[in-house]
Image (cartoon, grey):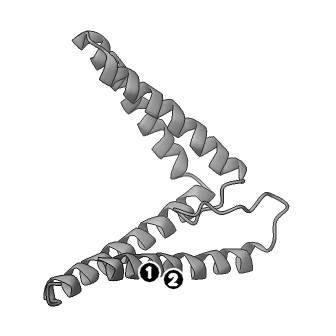
Amino acid sequence: MKRILLFAVLAAGLSTSPALAQDQHQHGPTTETTELDPQSGMMMGSEAMQEHRQKMQEMRALMQQAQAASEPAERQRLMAEHHQKMQEHMAHMMQGDHAAMMQACQERMVMMHDMMEQMAAHQNMSPQN
């Protein structure tokens, strides 16, 4: 189990490091805060990231309200509002520079999924401890 965790951490580090280095090479240093989120490896100080966090918080709040609603009509209204906010945010993310970021994220997710499949297959073939 410890080996799987180690491989996952290494794979995550290896998949995000070149992308971040390439991004810095293409765009050069910025004056924005470049603090990285330790879990996702994403830059947390950019204006776009702050806007994304705000929209995500709004959607989470709507989902919590919908889950707590006791009336089916109220739950349905909140879920419809949540769905509309998700659609709007996704449409916004697919415009301009965000489209390239989304494509890069999707590619990284595919690589991570492939790596996790290989780690699971390796674990299944290893002798049981």
Residue beneath the point at 52% across and 78% down: 13
In the image: residue 116, left or right of residue 97: left
65, above or below 116, in the image:
above
**Which residue is disc 2 drawn over?**
14
Under mark 1, the amino acid is: Ala
In the image: residue 44, left or right of residue 2: right
33, above or below 67, in the image:
below
Q: Could you tell me which quadrant the N terminus lies in? A: bottom left
**Which residue is disc 1 drawn over?**
11
* Image coords of residue 89 (percent x, y): 50, 41
82, above or below 34, in the image:
above
How many neighbours does mark 2 have within 10 angstroms: few (below 14), some (14-19), or many (20 or more)? few
* Image coords of residue 59 (percent x, y): 46, 33
In the image: residue 118, left or right of residue 83: left
* Image coords of residue 97 (percent x, y): 62, 59
Secondary element at image label 2: helix
Distance, label 2 to label 1, CA atoms, is 5 Å
Kindly indicate whether the residue at mark 1 contacts the one at mark 2 (C-beta within 8 angstroms).
yes
Residue 96: quadrant of the picture = bottom right
Residue 7: quadrant of the picture = bottom left
